[in-house]
Amino acid sequence: MPDTSEDKQDRLSRIWTDWGLRVDTPTGDALQVALGAADSWLQKGSSDPEIVIRAVQVLLVDPERPDAHKRNCWGSLRKAIRGAWGNAMTAPDHVLLGQSLVLAAWPQEIQGRWFDLARLLDSAWDVLAGRDRQQNEMTRWREENQVRLMRDVGKRLRVQQSLQVTPNVSVDIAPVTSALVQFEQNQTTNRFDNAAPYLLAVFVALKDTLSTLSNALQSMSGDMSTVIKRTQEDSDRIRVAMCGVEGELNLLWWGQARYCETLRKPFRRIEHPEDVVWWAACEAADRARDIDVEPAAAYLVETLHDLGQDIFEKRPLLRWMEELHASLKRAAQLAPALSDRLERYAREDALGLPVTWVRLRAAQNESLEGAVEKVALDLNAEIDRGQWASWIFRERLLDLYLVGDS
Amino acid sequence: MSLPLPVEPLRCRHPDCTLPEGGRCARADEFPDPLASCPELVRNDEPSTTPAPVARSAAPTPTEDAAPWKGRHLDLLEADQLLQRSPARVIAVLGAYDAGKTCLLASFFLQIASGQRGPFPYRFASSRTLYGFQALVDRANQWSGKEGEDIVGHTPKEQSEHPGQFLHLGVRPSKASDDRHLDILLSDVPGEWFTEWTSRTDAEARRRLGFIERSDGFVVVVDAAALLGASGGKVDSNAGLLLRRLASELRPRRTPRALALVFSKFDRILDRVTPPSIENGLQRDAWGLLGKRAARIWSAIEQAREVGLNVMPFAVSAFPRPLGAGQPVGVMVPFAHIMATADHRDRWPRLSPSVPEGATCFAALRRWEAAP
């Protein structure tokens, strides 16, 4: 179903009726302009991954945290809105309203692959607590994203029905024959007297027949180009599906072999269990570029379980980050470098990107001081090893997508 | 020769702006020269043709406006604008005329502002209605302690289009690891509005109290002394009606809401009733004579609990003695009860969207469940 501005306004009304105070939901000019600006900003996300990442970060911001309105992600949205109309937002700290605008303006249909990146930031939602007022709408948004992505994966494998092309080039030449017969009869009886009208009749019949022939050929050429286009699309789909199948096979074999290619030894022989989590997540991500993220993340966790890791062991997020920092220091030069793009994004705002931020700090040989402000999540929230492995996997995949594009 | 008419002074529609009083423009970062470009500022350069009012009894005096904050009660529009910043916890304080709602709010402010927060796990951080609180406290400060004398002024029934209805408090959790700043909006509306709301359902009464559905918690104040007095039956009946009306108005929500039933002016009946412990608070018998006189209230409590309200009665004395001579009793507990629900910090549940039918074995593989 195509998005219409009315749908978006309805969504905004529904959200603000729940989040706001006034029973008559505000639908003033300023808010409509703000919604339009948020919509235009998000539309750019089809070609600019940063917009999608910043938009998800805007949703992740806890408006009650200090300096929530000073974050770069919020600054990006606010700049877009102020660019449309300085009065559209009434104050620079109206983060809650900004979040409602993003939710309302989020495209309901896939608009370019970059919107898929939203799922790669999904781990951050695992540590969110409170924010009861927002939970319903944000959960709805996350569920819609997941369902849409599953539907999209299904679509990729569906090959279109081929177009039947029936050559329809039946040209009636009877008028030409008839005109020629009459011309000959006239020639026989009248020699060349009064031949011009008969000759003209022959030419007219010929012209009509050629015109019919030309139209038929043109129509066939249109059908042929449709067939070629569809065949190309089918071929692309098959190629994507084959890439997916190949990716699934590679991942499955990797899981069976449990061999760390980077360190050139089986995972079970890696000394530190946290190194196993890091390298396994990294290598699984390398093989999961063309396949569905959620099953691949689940498969990674099952593989870790098979390797004897306690996937249900819970630790605070900060502790996992410290372990990763130590693993990366041990990995030294072997650790893959961050892509320039993701590095820039994380430098400007690392909200919800703890793995990327730790990689950034480790690469610079710096400590994790300031993690609370930079990552802006509850670092005391406990998550299990499986969740943490999935988190590393998703952020590594995010990095790979961005590298691939640049 | 007549003198020229005075130039109309600056006015600003932004609640936080103090530029007209010689302060700072609230949007100074957007408009470096607010006098030239800020769209919120209004000034008629033409001399006013209407004479200035001689006295403005309802409007604030220039001295009042000089504070660097809004100061007075926030109206519905201003409160809604505050909510654009963060999901403020709205606490509706309900009760009949003279039940002690405003006294409770004044006492609550005094306690939290002076750091005596007791069981209330938040500390004072800010307020956009300091002048409103200050006005309440000033009046209470003048109370001599005589019975029958008003401790605070009765909340006026403003007839304006947007009457001030809310007091604002910014608080920070006392837990060191929690650095949030929470906005709390406390409703302060006249008791007559609730009487009108419970007795008839006209559009105006609904509009004025439209914030009730959005509220995150409720404080229903009942005058305990009046309940034991000659008109106790009527007090019981009215309070029961209010509670039932509230229970029937609220739509079911995923997260529960708390209701603190405050028996106010408890110091006046301490010789006849001993308040029970918090654990026994819901047992009507534990309230002795008060429980006996509150049959309709207790029946309404049951109804409120059935619709998901987490109800708990409390005995409160907001001003047992003049300010300099004694401390309030039990004022912070009802608010702590409400905030325990309104600001509970459960982790969000993990998503579990259904896997499409016919998905491959690989596509169906998911790890939705949480750790045991």
Image (cartoon, coloured by chain):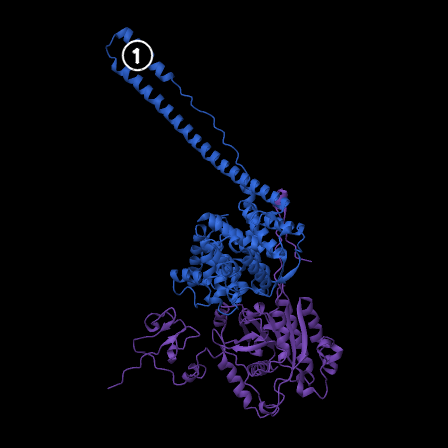
Chain colours: A blue, B purple
Q: Kindly indicate the quadrant of the structure image that contains residue A272.
A: bottom right
Q: Which class describes the residues within 10 Å of circle 1: few (<14), some (14-19), or many (20+)?
A: many
Q: Position of residue B299 (x, y in %)?
A: 71, 73
Q: Position of residue A185 (x, y in %)?
A: 31, 9
Residue B189 lies, in percent from the top left, at: 55, 77
Q: Is residue A102 above or below residue B285?
A: above
Task: Identify the residue at the far top of this view.
Answer: A189
Indicate whether A211 appears above or below B363: above
Tell whether B2 sits left or right of A244. Answer: left
Q: Amino acid at mark 1?
A: Phe
Which image quadrant for residue B175? bottom right
* Residue A129 against residue B173 in the figure, above or below: above
Decide if residue B245 is in sight here: no
Residue at 53%, 84% (x, y): give it: B136
As rendered, which of A271 and A27 lies closer to the eye? A271
Out of A319 and B232, give the one closest to the viewer: A319
Give the residue at mark 1. Answer: A183
